[in-house]
Structure formats: C-alpha cells, structure tokens
Image: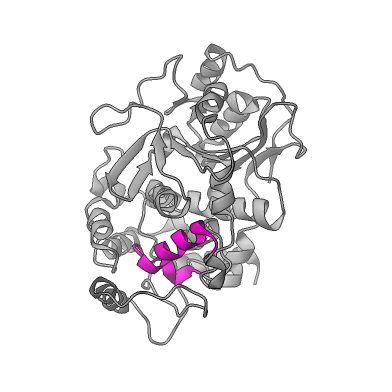
Amino acid sequence: MSNRKLLLAAAALAWSGCLLVRTLSSDAPSAAPSNSESRRRLQLATFHDPKSETPRYVLQHEPQLLHLKNAGPSIFRERPDEGGGGKLVIDVLSIGSETRVEYLTAQLETWASHVNVRHFWGVTERQDFALGCPQMTEADLRSYYDTCSNPMGWEPKYEQFRRSHFGVASGVSLEERLRQPGWFCAQRRPGRALGWLQSKYGSEGVRLPDMLLLVDDDTSVDVNLLEKLMAKATGKDNPLVYGGCVFNLFRGFALPFGGFGTFFNKDALTKLTQPIHCDERQKDSPYLQHVCAALRENKVGELAVFQSGDSALEVFYKYAGLQNFCMHSDWLVGYMISNYSGASLQNIVPRKASKCRTDSCKLTSVTCHNQTPRHMLEFTKSHAQTPKWSPQPKSQ
C-alpha cells in the first residue's frame, strides 16, 4: 500500500479512540506518591486501554510518525549556513494553508527577505499528520469535540480551561466552528512543524539560528526592531522567548496569540532541542531537573508520549499527533514554552483589555497580524525593510 493510502486510511480512524497512557522506559521520571498524583493517575487510568501500552496516534504506527517528522515544508527558501552577511542568523517558520499559499509567498518577498533571514519554511495541509482530516464528517467532529470537552485526567486548572474553551476562538460560535473541520485540523500544524525543526536542528545538524520566528502566514515582522528588542538576551544560558501578544492565564501557563508571532533566541532553542534524560544525567543540569519535574507533574498527559532521549520539540510533536489532541495551537506552544523552555514568555504588543489589537499596525509595531499580501508590502516599505536578497522560493 502506498504511503498516501496509508495516510488516508489512518485519517479514517483519526477521530475515534481514547487517549492512552504508556509504560515509560526505565529512566523516565517517577512520580512522587502524593495524593494529587495518585488522583491524577486514577483519572488517567479511565483512559487507559489494558490491551495496549502505546499511545494511539493519528497515524497507524509510530514509525510513520517518526518518518513524517523529516518531511519537508510546502514552500521553502534556504541559503548557505554561514548566512547572508548580516550580523545575526534568523530562521522563519510560517504556518499557512494551501487555500492561500500566496500569503507565504508574500512573506518571502517582503519582510522575510531581510538580509539576516537564513531559512524560510512554510508549512500547510500537505504536511499534516492526516491528509484526510478536513473530510471529517460532522458526526465525527462532534464526537471529537465531546471527547475533548469531558474529563481527561489533566491537572484541574488545565482541565477546566480546556473544557470551557476548546473550540471557541476568534469570535466564531461553537455551532459554526463544529462545521469547520479544517480549523480543528489546523490546530495540530504548529506541533507538526516542531518535529520538522527537530529534524533540521537535531538529526541534520543545521546550526541553530540566533533567532527563530514562529509566525502565521498573515504575520508581518519588523526584523530590525525585533533584533533590538531581543538584544537584551546576552551571555550564555539566557533563554528568551517573546510573544507578539501574550495572555497570562494562570501561574505557570502563558500563551501567545499565534497571529502576532512567537520568537525564540538561541539559548531557548538549545534547551528545546536538547535530549531529555531523567536519570543520573540530570543531576548536573538544572534544565533537565526542571523538565523532568514537569514530566512528573504530567499536567496535560504529555508523559504518555515521552521516550528517553526525546527533546521537548519531539515530545510536543508527538503530542500533537495523538488522536485526541485537545488543544488549540496557541495552547500547545504556550504550554511547551511555559514548562519546557527554561524561559518565561514575555509580551511585545500591548493588548487592550482582554483582546489583542489586530486592527492596529503602526510604524512602531514590531509585529502585526491580519496582514494581506498588500499589507505586507506596505509594512516592509514603511518599516524601511527593503528586500536584501531574492532567490526564487522552492515548492515541494
């Protein structure tokens, strides 16, 4: 059977089943015998299939999941690793869609053509875990939503937040959203892209950039202003992550509004791509002690997908591939940063009351959202970011 047929067959099963918990390897973090942890284990047990000890992913077999991690983006432009003569090396990962691929192309031709941008990667539905996901029936989508709206054994604060907000975003009513399977499918896409980053920075050994820009396809960024803002992160072991617009929901959980972008410095990327070992190797590493403690807490069930030697990027790549992935994309990125990057998520764009200002883009704006290709061109000209190089983008 061809790979495409395997993917389509897997898609038919992608929205049934339950979140499964798996026995970990011998060096996985063991939980302290607290009452709260015992309760969490009891809750998780209700979603455990006694006939299987492996998590159930969208793809039928975990080897497919590992293979898909290396599949390249839909649109990309790369140049030699030494960069293009700028002082900093910047990579851009943009989350887009085949329905408006011209947005990715516009980013390439405007602000992302800055002299310091080394690589640009644009991902779309063609890189999704299950290519047939948008064809999900309304009944299957309703079943998926119901699963994600019921108890799943998460830590109570996260559980309450998920049950109250899953499927609700951008002013779209729940009933309307339940007729939009493509929107739910797209929530996995940034997690899927984390696997690509690990394959580039880990397996292929591509040198880490000074900054990684994780953006949506309707984001514009003033690279010069961003560089000045992040210049405060100097010295070794100083992880820094900025969000274009950040919501601090409760202690230990902040999430970025993806349309404004999320920006990682090299020290944060170093930690997120580092293999995690929760054995004697953690004793001399404050970072490993921190992430192993986070795994023990297992606030949203991520321990189920962890294998010794995984990086944080790999953990949340696999987590996004679970059949019952019950997060919005911004939640996933924010949770990973808050608990596994060693950095706190800092805000760039002031927000009005409880909303991000998507209708305001000024000369002083570091990043703007809801940008059409025309807006991107105007943004680049007004922010004095004349394109410095323009090789043609490649498509796969």
**Which quadrant of the rendered structure holds the N terminus?**
bottom right
Q: Nearer the viewer, residue 285 or 82?
A: 285
The quarter holding residue 157 reads: bottom left
The quarter holding residue 77 reads: top right
**Residue 322 drawn at (x, y percent):** 44, 65
Q: Nearer the viewer, residue 373 or 66?
A: 66
328 in relation to 351, above or below: below
Q: How is the image coloured?
A: one colour
141 in relation to 54, above or below: above
Kindly report the secondary structure that dominates the magenta region of the rendered protein: helix
**Residue 359 drawn at (x, y percent):** 35, 22
Q: Which residues are magenta?
A: 284-306
Residue 318, visible in the rendered structure = yes
Q: Nearer the viewer, residue 264 or 318?
A: 264
Report how many numbered discs are placed on residues in the image: 0
Query: Residue at the location (61% across, 54% down)?
Result: 198
**Residue 107 drawn at (x, y percent):** 58, 29
The quarter holding residue 52 reads: bottom left
382 in relation to 100, above or below: above
